Image: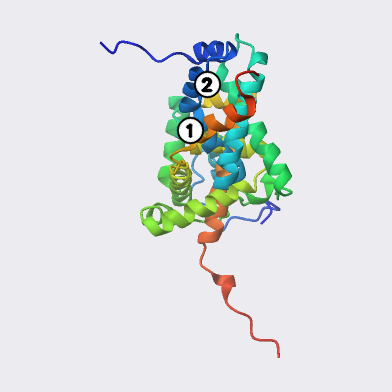
Amino acid sequence: MTKGKKTRSPSAHCHTDEITCERLVMEALYDFEEGTMPETERALLERHLGLCPPCVRFLDSYRATGKTLRALKPRDIPPSLAQTVFQFVKERCGKKR
Amino acid sequence: MDGVSAPSDLDLVRRIKAGDERALEQMIERYHARVYSLSYGVLRNAEDAEESTQDTFLTLYRKIGTFDESKKFFSWFYRVALNQAYSRARRRKPAARISIQEHLPRFHNDGHLAGPDWADASVAIESEASARELARRAEEFIGELPRTYRDVIWMADVEEMPAAQVAEVLGISIPALKSRLHRARLHVRQRLAEISRPARRAVPREAAG
């Protein structure tokens, strides 16, 4: 699964503008998603997306990845953890450091 | 009237330095869940995360005299928590590492995407069972990243900390943070896409005599 050598594309569906899929995915997607991209560049990307179903699917999967990551945050914090930690520190340090 | 506002981190730090036990208790109450979650991101094990949380607050109590009050407390303290967790992780087992280059999107010569595609991604995360499985695998894929990428994606995307805070904790610039975070996301997305592909290669080989 190495990035490895590149091959010829089987189709050229989105060759009508200066944004390639590679540039969109590797360089521009972060700012596009974070809303930190200048409007002119954003318009170029949106135009590319309008012509390129694989990039639309990629964007969709990038967003799905983000949603999956946000769901990872541990929610089952042990209920007595704060008290356990406090006792742990007190037992080891007593009243003085 | 309940007009008393919560003490600032710095107020608590100064009171802990002065030996105020109640301030320590308040600091633990304020930060224990975040420290636990951060530790879990490194250790991926509830028991280890709990013990690392205890050690982090013990270190806080012992080292608080060295904290420079002109700096932000949370970034100093998060570094303490990360160091505790990594220290525990090193004692536990050697970390399996892969190069970030191994699982990034691939492209044809002309810059077109070369896959793997993940066409049903948005559908997959709508189903509770498959979303849970994806989350389990995503956690595993974060775990195989080098630390420089793992800390960034855990804090920014899992913990949802603001980019500026993550950059401050890790002592890196915002452009460096963006670059690492994007590549880490691409890695996890690529790995999830790989496992979501139709199992063409899962056809069992003929039994060899």
Residue at 65 percent of width and 14 percent of height: B65
Q: Do the residues labelled 1 and 2 touch (CB within 8 Å)?
A: no
Q: In this view, does B201 lie above or below B34?
A: below
Tell me the quadrant of the picture where the C terminus of chain A can be found.
top right
Which residue carries the number 1 mark? A83
- Please report, as a chain letter, where disc 2 is located: B
B135 and B42: which one is in front?
B42
The three-letter code of the residue at mark 2 reads: Leu
Callouts 1 and 2 in the same chain = no
Going 72% across and 43% down the picture, which residue do you hit? B90
Question: Type of residue at label 1?
Answer: Gln
- State the mark number for residue B139: none
Q: Which residue lies furthest to the left in this view?
A: B1
Q: In this view, does B41 lie to the left or right of B66?
A: left
Instruction: Give percent across and percent down for residue B206.
Output: 64, 85
Q: Is residue A39 left or right of residue B186?
A: left
Report which residue position mark 2 lands on: B24
Q: Mark 1 lies on which chain?
A: A
Q: Residue at x 61, y 40 (%)?
A: B150
Q: Toward which corner of the image does residue A47 lie, by quadrant?
A: top left
Which residue is more in the foreground, B52 or B19?
A: B19
Residue B185 percent across, percent down from the top left? 55, 42
Q: What distance separates the C-alpha of mark 1 from that of mark 2? A: 11 Å
Q: Residue at x 65, y 22 (%)?
A: B62
Number of residues whose C-alpha sits closer than 10 Å to that of mark 1, classed few (under 14), some (14–19) or many (20 or more): few
Q: Locate residue B22, reporting x and y percent.
A: 48, 19
Helix, strand or loop under label 2 = helix
Q: Is residue B175 visible?
A: no
